[in-house]
Image (cartoon, rainbow, N blue to C red):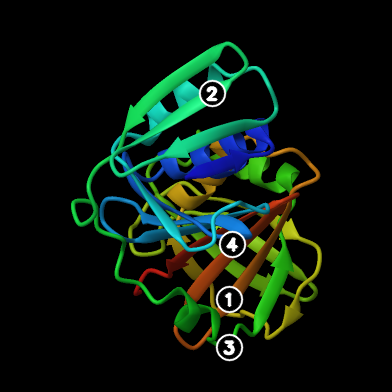
């Protein structure tokens, strides 16, 4: 069965690479109109649902059980052409692109487990606060984190029309802090009492080095304290899902 990759660079940087930041291995689902993957970090506190939209020659969903995503990325990085074809059989994929050819062996079904998470159920929650998070504000938070080394928490709150991010730990004494606006406006409910999430999520997003054309929208379900960081980059959609700390 032939699986065509129509934009190699986009597939590597906006689909495969984000997966490597959370997990060593992953199940990749190839559909007739898109390629998707659902993965989590080691303690399941951070979920990533990533979609690469493109037409495909497959008629039914195909599962690629990739044992080492980083190695898979390295193989794709050897290809110089924008388009490449993956010839899939039961236990491997063979890639041919010009004079280059590689074979990569996959795991059998059932060895890798897809996280037992109902993504649609999460998306169906009522998200009553929404704001844009620009790349410059992510970079400023990352710079500040070199100063606030005693915390891994980012507190999010609103004041007047702005959304603020504060690096600190309100459960401990004598912790350095840094606070700045991270969005100049928001839609929906205000957040007068700060809600904290793991700052590792911001580090992960920052490490992707997304270009400024990528749009990041943060959705918050205030009742259950669930966050979705919704990132759109051309044909790719990354949805990072996490819950607030209980404080």
Q: Which residue is mark 3?
A: 126
Residue 182: percent from the left, percent from the top? 70, 56
Distance CA(mark 4)–CA(mark 1): 9 Å
Sequence-first disc among 4 and 3: 3
Q: Residues within 10 Å of mark 4 (few under 14, many from 20)?
A: many
**Residue 110 makes an appearance in the image:** yes
The answer to which of marks 3 and 1 sits earlier in the sequence is: 3
Name the spot of residue 94 as percent of width and height, x first: 43, 29
Q: Is residue 203 visible?
A: no
Q: Considering the numbered disc 3 on the image, is that residue within a helix, a strand or a loop?
A: loop
- Dot 3 and dot 1 residues touching (CB under 8 Å): no
Q: Secondary structure at mark 2?
A: strand
Asked whether the beta carbons under mark 2 and mark 3 sit within 8 Å of each other, the answer is no
Q: Residues within 10 Å of mark 2 (few under 14, many from 20)?
A: some
Q: Residue under label 2, please give it.
A: 96
23 or 6, which lies in front? 6
Q: Earlier in the sequence, mark 4 or mark 1?
A: 1
**Residue 208 placement, left or right of 197:** right
Image point 68% across, 39% down: which residue?
Answer: 6
Q: Which mark is residue 100?
A: none
Residue 93 position (above or below residue 224):
above
Q: Earlier in the sequence, mark 2 or mark 4?
A: 2
Quadrant the C terminus occupies: bottom left
Q: Which residue is drawn at the image coordinates 65% and 56% (left, top)?
A: 231
Residue at the image point whose x is 54% and y is 55% from the top: 58
Q: Which residue is mark 4?
A: 229
User: Horizontal and vertical percent for residue 116?
Assistant: 29, 70
Residue under circle 1?
220
């Amino acid at each position: 069965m032939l699986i065509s990759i129509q934009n190699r660079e986009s597939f590597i940087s906006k689909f495969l690479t984000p997966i490597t930041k959370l997990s060593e291995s992953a199940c990749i689902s190839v559909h007739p109109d898109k390629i998707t993957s659902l993965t989590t970090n080691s303690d399941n506190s951070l979920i990533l649902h990533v979609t690469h939209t493109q037409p495909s020659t497959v008629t039914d969903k195909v599962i690629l059980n990739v044992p080492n995503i980083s190695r898979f990325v390295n193989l794709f990085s050897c290809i110089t052409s924008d388009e490449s074809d993956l010839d899939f059989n039961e236990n491997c994929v063979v890639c041919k692109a010009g004079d280059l050819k590689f074979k990569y062996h996959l795991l059998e079904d059932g060895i890798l487990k897809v996280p037992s998470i109902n993504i649609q159920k999460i998306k169906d929650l009522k998200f009553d606060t929404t704001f844009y998070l620009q790349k410059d504000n992510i970079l400023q938070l990352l710079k500040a984190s070199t100063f606030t080394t005693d915390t891994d928490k980012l507190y999010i709150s609103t004041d007047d029309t702005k959304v603020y991010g504060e690096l600190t730990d309100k459960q401990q004494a004598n912790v350095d802090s840094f606070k700045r606006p991270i969005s100049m406006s928001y839609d929906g409910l205000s957040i007068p009492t700060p809600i904290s999430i793991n700052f590792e999520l911001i580090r992960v997003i920052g490490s992707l080095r997304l270009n400024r054309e990528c749009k990041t929208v943060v959705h918050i379900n205030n009742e259950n304290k669930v966050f979705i960081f919704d990132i759109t980059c051309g044909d790719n959609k990354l949805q990072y899902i996490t819950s607030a700390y209980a404080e």
